Amino acid sequence: MMRAPVGLLSAAILLLASSADIAAQDLMDHSAHSGHDSMRLDRDGSVMNENLDSLPRGCEALGRHLHFTIHAGVKYARDIPGSIFGMSQYEVRVEPCSRVTVTFVNEDEVRHQWMVHGLPKYLYPAGMFHIEASGGKSVTGTFIVPAEDRNYLIHCDLSQHMEKGMRGQLVVGRGSGDLWSVGGASAYFFRDDYMPRFALLFAVLLAVPGFLATWYLAKRESATGSASRREIFD
Amino acid sequence: MKIRKSLLLLIAAIAIGALSYPPQWYPMPLRLQLTRWFGAADYRPLPLSMDPQVLDAETFCPEDASGWREAQVIDGVSVTRSAPCVADNPYAVAAFVKGTNNVSKDTLLRSGLTSDAVEKGRDLDGDGDPDEIHIRLEVAELNGGSSVTQRPVTSYDIAPGIQPGMWVFAPKLVGMAVENFETGIARDALRLPSPAIRVEQGDSITITLENSHYMPHTLHLHGADHGFVDSSGEGNDGVPITSEIPVMPGHARSYELQPRHAGTMFYHCHVQPHVHVLMGLQGLFVVEENRPNNWLQTMNVGAGLVRAPSAAVRESYDQEYDLHYLDLDKDLGERIRKYRDPRLITQSMHREYDITDADVDFFTLNGRSFPYTFRESLLVAAEGERLKLRVVNGGAKGISLHTHGHKFSVTDRDGVRLSPATIVPQDVVWIPTAQRVDLDLFLTNDGLHSYGRGIWLYHDHQNKGVTNDGIGPGGNISAIVYADYIDDSGWPKTQGVPWNQYFTKEYYRKEIPIWESYAPGLFSNTVSDPWWYPRLAGMALALAMLAALSIAALRRRSS
Ligand SMILES: [Cu+2]
Ligand SMILES: [Cu+2]
């Protein structure tokens, strides 16, 4: 019985899904993983596509130098129900053309990443800037954000880390609208149901008196109404 | 007057109903009687065959753009040639042999591994090879769910269009889990099965499980000599109910062992093992005999050909292969995509899923099912070569491993050498769940060990094992291919039916008639019989008329 509306809903979601996929792909747009052309790697972790001084197109001068310290670990997920991996900060707001230095502190005993996607490919191969820290390590990297107002995806690309909490956004200038499913900032695009156990019974209990009341009112009206109306109800 | 009209309508309804009722549905006595009166009905042709569907087949044998198949020497490590289309990354092989802490920076970068993935330390017994080995394992989810896309995340196809949800142990890698974001395909080292691990007898081994997954896991060294507690007195067996608290997400734990006995062993997670082991958290654990200058390929990603075999194996064999059989339950794997919230996933997998009512659907060999097995797990050899096969059945049901054209001998079972009298040629071996067998497969053309050159299948002879969810050919079918029966790209020169349809999703979605490629039209899908439309219309009209007449009659009676 409950399956029908759920089915309809999921059909609607399916239609929406393709557009969400496209939107997500747009933000994640980058060609084949370009390997190690610009990678600083040591035992603590790695920084890929670091950029200290190349200005993105449209930037007349380098903006402010901003510094963020972002912690990662399971303990930062505790306040967000249904997530396992977390970050101390999911939203990073910066002015266009600023130089952003991120110190990524990994408080877990497994690897984590802080990756930004969708950056201009002429400066950042594959459109990404990427910091990876081994368990218990901290790694610092710097990049320069483009001139346009836009939201960029931040995430950890270990299998299921983004899906289980490590998903944030970099907002440049006024941004271009929140991304979906950002920890503590925006809703999940696909969400589990969490339907109460007796929801069906509850719905039926409401529907029965609703039906009876409408029936009663309609009958009363037909008893007192015009002749033509009476014909309809007979 | 009114009654007469109704009567006429009633007669019309019955007539329409009777005329449109399909004769093949008439009761048998009536049909026989009609035959007696009128004889057989006139010939009416059966519906035609449908035109074959135009299919877009995948490339059978992807091009080896980076030259990974070739024999090469990397950082002084000899990596043998791998004949099938898809080969392991030889830089990772070299890094596993020398240790990720000892290889050149270039090799390390090309291997994709972290510098601490497999660390090799001191030579404790002074025999020319390192005896302190530190291995790090992560846990990865393949074909998982997401709150922003409905595509499987970190996708991995075991066969065309088949993407069961899976968990695997993985080597410790640098960077993203996927090749790139457009495809979302898992990078080559993230795959089923969990890597085969190779250590030397007597080595001092530490394995750190870095639990990068969102559920608790452990490492249990099945059959390999290890203490119940480690050097600090902590649990070392990986069994939550007796040994230690599982490794929670984001946490790590080290297991220690110094195996005194050599042989083919096994490792797996021991948290809710009826679910976690079936999901893929299991791998071969090979303890090689101690030899001088024995530099081992500590991990064999995806199992298969060992491209840098041990000294002991090189003494007696030309090639060594790790063969990992695993079956998968579609219904279990789906649950990691059905829910996003780990609380709901856990509830669904560990409470709602009932393995006592379950059955398996997919049958993999080294992480793939037919036809993808032919890209990776062919045993390619020349006549006269001696092959050592280390086989584990990690599946929920037993397998009945059979070779065409050959008889092999079981030399070891569960890592223990059998008595010589029992080592006899056979062509079927029963391998129950979790058992390992070492097989000698000698390509000696003597009418017993081998019947000569060719392409000879080897597969589980239990019938469901050669299907993908009931569609054959599928499952763990692979082949022994003699060197002159394989082309330069690594594809066997088969001379049977065309394979295009097997490389389509549609075939395994059960949409393609199975013999269409070589008997088109004969066993095709049929077009439907258009006569059903007037018949169904007539029957529906008759029923509607009868219903209307009955209601009218009832109303007349009540008024
Ligand atoms: Cu992470
Ligand atoms: Cu587990």
Image: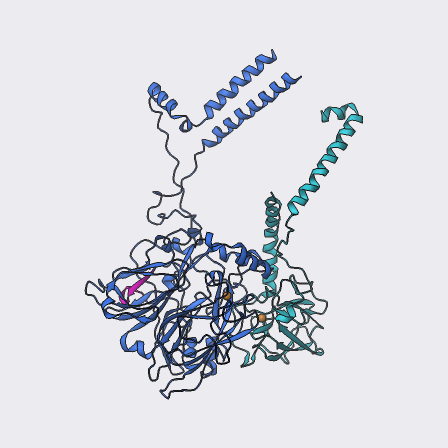
Chain colours: A cyan, B blue
In the displayed structure, B162 sits above or below B542; it is: below
Q: Residue at x 59, y 47 (%)?
A: A7
Q: Is residue B159 left or right of residue A216?
A: left
Q: Quadrant of residue A194?
A: bottom right
Please identify the residue farthest to the left as the structure is shown.
Answer: B446
Q: Nearer the viewer, residue A192 or B377?
A: A192
Q: Quadrant of residue B505?
A: bottom left
Quarter of the image containing the N terminus of chain A? top right
Would residue A142 be found to the left or right of residue B348 on screen?
right
User: What are the residue bounds of the magenta stretch?
Assistant: B478-487
Q: Is residue B364 above or below residue A34?
A: above
Quadrant of the rendering where the C terminus of chain A is positioned: top right
Question: Which x, y percent locates residue B441?
Answer: 27, 67
Q: Is residue B416 magenta?
A: no
Residue B137 appears in the figure: yes
Nearest the viewer among B169 and B173 is B169
**Is residue B384 in view?**
no
* Residue B202 screen position, x and y as percent: 38, 81
Which residue ends up furthest to the top in the rendered image? B1
Residue B468: x %, y % from top left: 41, 54
Is A155 drawn above or below residue B119 in the view shown? above
Instruction: Report the residue at 32% width, 56% height from top.
Output: B461
Q: Position of residue B526 (x, y in %)?
A: 40, 40
Image quadrant in which you'd find residue A67: bottom right
Who is closer to the viewer here, B405 or B264?
A: B264
